[in-house]
Amino acid sequence: MRLGRWMRPCARLWPAPPLLAAIRGHQYLAVIIATPCVSYSVAHASDLAPEQWWRTREHFSGAPHLSDVAKAWLQKHDRLAATSAAFAFAALGVGAQVIIENPAPRFDPSLPCYWPARADVQTLWHSPAIKALRAHAGPYLRMVVLPHCSFGHGPSGKLFQKYTGFLCSA
């Protein structure tokens, strides 16, 4: 596995073309992607009514009540999701292993992190780019969910359990 200059955050998206070329050039055996999760986390919806959520099924890239600045910020995160999916597509295309890490999906009743009250919160796993990746890869990618932090009281005093989802090549 090659390390070094590519371990910079991809938030500005500038390393995407050379990194994609390196992945396609078989320079990596595995690609681990940790897409910034702040806009996809159920945490932002924890104290809000569903009509106040940032993302909805009908408006994935920004609910109508958000300002243009807020929608632009969400769209930047959508581009990060698309870049993450592009890295994963490239890696799968050359037989490299892939892991994408983000907050666990809360909408799947078969997973231990299922949370009916937050099942409609739109996460990275709902993004069009990641949905397309999963559709393309089929059973070659699977979701693994692990408790990331111990169950207990957080700084807010609320009881919580943070789960992390890993979309992994099999």
Image (cartoon, rainbow, N blue to C red):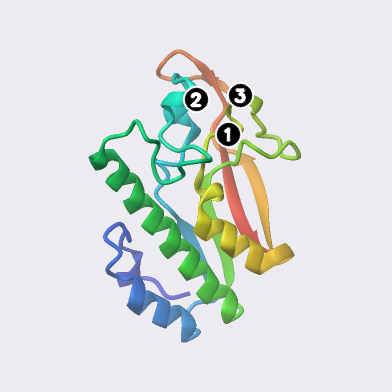
Front residue of 6 and 121 = 121
Q: Are marks 1 and 3 in contact (CB under 8 Å)?
A: no
Asked if residue 61 shows in the view, the reply is yes
Hey, which residue is sitting farthest right in the picture?
Answer: 110
Q: Position of residue 30 (x, y in %)?
A: 54, 70
Marks 1/2: CA distance? 8 Å
Splitting the image into 4 quarters, where does residue 29 fall?
Answer: bottom right
Q: Are marks 1 and 2 in contact (CB under 8 Å)?
A: yes
Front residue of 23 and 148 = 23
Hey, which residue is sitting farthest top in the picture?
Answer: 157
Q: Position of residue 41 (x, y in %)?
A: 47, 37
**Disc ID at residue 117:** 3
Instruction: Work out whether mark 2 precedes mark 3 in sequence or the reverse, and give the earlier one.
Output: 2
Asked if residue 96 shows in the view, the reply is no
Amino acid type at mark 1: Asp
Marks 2/3: CA distance? 10 Å
**Which residue is at 38% across, 75% downward?**
19
Front residue of 37 and 120 = 120
- Looking at the rendered structure, the secondary structure element under dot 2 is helix
Q: Position of residue 45 (x, y in %)?
A: 46, 27
* Residue occupied by mark 2: 50
- Looking at the rendered structure, the secondary structure element under dot 3 is helix
**Which residue is at 25% across, 41% downward?**
68
Splitting the image into 4 quarters, where does residue 155 fall?
Answer: top left
**Which residue is at 56% across, 49% downward?**
125
Q: Position of residue 63 (x, y in %)?
A: 40, 36
Amino acid type at mark 2: Pro
Front residue of 101 and 125 = 125
* Residue occupied by mark 1: 120
